[in-house]
Amino acid sequence: MSTIADNVLRVSARIDAAAHAVQRDPASIGLLAVSKTKPAEAVREAFAAGISEFGENYLQEALGKQEQLTDLPLTWHFIGPIQSNKTRAIAEHFAWVHSVDRLKIAQRLSEQRPADLPPLNICIQVNVSGEASKSGCAPADLPALATAIAALPRLTLRGLMAIPEPTEDRAQQDAAFATVRTLQESLNLPLDTLSMGMSHDLESAVAQGATWVRIGTALFGARDYGQQP
Ligand SMILES: *Cc1c(COP(=O)(O)O)cnc(C)c1O
């Protein structure tokens, strides 16, 4: 059975190879370890193997893990669906939110971001798979949403996030991620982040410009409980 440390090496090698294939600097691609459904001990193991950025989907689960890991210098990213009544805790306990898809949530996060913390880094989740996905802002609504979020005082809009419909077809993966990149380029804003690519499609995402790949299964193994997107 492979350990988390083995998996970190394997995933890092995949990112390096994918970056070199398109003449990108591998250092420009961040590895966000998605630890949802995995215990704090797994996060500790990943940290020991060199990972310090972790993504979580479920607030209560994330807060519990954070409490057990206060001795480690970790950076936490919220990547799951956001209900209004969860925004205060998210604004207080995370450095990044990748899954903002409506203005009301962004406004609450800005109002609730504690004054002693730096602005919260935000990615707008965009729905590039049409009816196949319910979460994410429709591409047609993106320009207005991005402009409004960029103006909020306690947020820094960094870029876009997407979860395309899963497919093993490389051409389809490339097309979906290229759409995300093109949407970002079409916004006239100083954005530096494309959060895209998961365990099965990180090569395509890196080829199309990902700056965060969000990797769960390939680092921690199959998830044993909880919902999967
Ligand atoms: C679970 C999850 C991931 C990780 O998916 P894997 O296929 O296990 O790598 C990435 N992003 C989001 C938003 C997720 O919910």
Image (tube, rainbow, N blue to C red):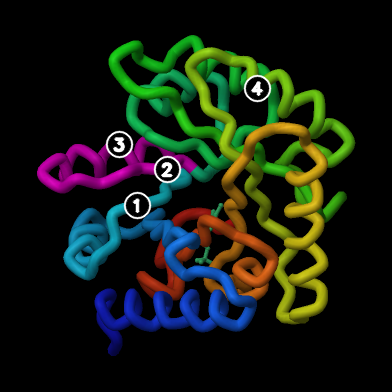
Q: Secondary structure at mark 4?
A: helix
Q: Which residues are magenta?
A: 58-78
Residue under label 4? 149
C-alpha distance separating marks 4 and 2: 18 Å
Mark 1 or mark 2: whose residue is earlier in sequence: 1
In front of the other: label 3 or label 2?
2
Residue under label 1? 53
Q: Quadrant of the C terminus?
A: bottom right
Where residue 216 appears, as percent x and y from the top left, is 45, 65
Name the amino acid type tagged 4. Answer: Ile
Q: Secondary structure at mark 3?
A: helix
C-alpha distance separating marks 4 and 3: 26 Å
Q: Mark 1 and 2 residues: CB-CB less than 8 Å, in contact?
A: yes
Mark 1 or mark 4: whose residue is earlier in sequence: 1
Name the amino acid type tagged 2. Answer: His
Name the amino acid type tagged 3. Answer: Leu
Per the rendering, the mark at residue 32 is none
Where residue 228 sits, quadrant-wise, is: bottom right
